[in-house]
């Protein structure tokens, strides 16, 4: 899908820039070029961001849940998105990354979303430092996971019931 292609390419270019201090944009790709224009603007407005990154895309595991946060800082997580807006589910995702990375920390911690607009070449950077909100988003994630597992179990029960009925 187009959104995944753009997001994946931008993720790689941004990682390359953070690690190596430069990147080359694929020619004739306006969406990627716009995202990278937004990234350059962000870097100018937040010059200490790159030096605050201690890890990128580490694999985090918690039972059946696996995630790869884009940027890990000593006291928070920033997730990178190439989209037209910051959606509520982004906060749920980055809060879960935070929980998986930092467990029960509570002081001076944050979650953040950096959105690069693929059409306008602008960025939006939002930070949440309210630990109660982060913990609330963790509860939302738990509810989503419960609903997902409930659906999976019910599908299997229905499949088994249909097989049983077919055999009769």
Image (cartoon, rainbow, N blue to C red):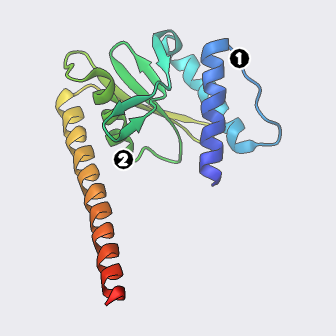
Q: Position of residue 98 (x, y in %)?
A: 32, 28
Which numbered marker is on residue 89? 2
Figure check: 131 above or below 141: above
How much space separates mark 2 and mark 1, taking CA atoms? 31 Å
Question: Which circle's residue, 2 or 1, is located before the other in the chain?
Answer: 1
Q: Secondary structure at mark 1?
A: loop
Question: Can residue 136 be seen here?
Answer: yes
Q: Secondary structure at mark 2?
A: helix
Figure check: 111 above or below 29: above
Q: Position of residue 44 (x, y in %)?
A: 58, 17
Quarter holding residue 59: top left
Q: Residues within 10 Å of mark 2 (few under 14, many from 20)?
A: few
Figure check: 64 above or below 126: below
The residue carrying mark 1 is 22
The residue depicted at 60 percent of the width and 32 percent of the height is 11
Residue farthest to the front, as pictured: 167
Q: Quadrant of the N terminus?
A: bottom right
């Amino acid at each position: 899908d187009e959104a995944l292609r753009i997001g994946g390419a931008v993720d790689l270019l941004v990682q390359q820039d953070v690690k190596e201090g430069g990147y080359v944009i694929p020619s004739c790709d306006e969406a990627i070029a716009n995202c990278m224009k937004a990234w350059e603007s962000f870097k100018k407005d937040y010059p200490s961001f790159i030096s605050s990154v201690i890890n990128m895309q580490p694999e985090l595991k918690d039972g059946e849940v696996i995630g790869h946060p884009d940027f890990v800082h000593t006291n928070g997580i920033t997730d990178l998105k190439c989209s037209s807006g910051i959606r509520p589910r982004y906060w749920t995702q980055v809060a879960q990354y935070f929980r998986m990375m930092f467990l029960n920390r509570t002081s001076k911690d944050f979650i953040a979303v950096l959105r690069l607009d693929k059409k306008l070449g602008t960025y939006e950077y939002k930070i949440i430092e309210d630990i109660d909100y982060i913990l609330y988003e963790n509860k939302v994630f738990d509810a989503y996971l419960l609903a997902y597992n409930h659906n999976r179990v019910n599908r299997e029960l229905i499949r088994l019931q249909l097989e049983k009925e077919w055999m009769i």
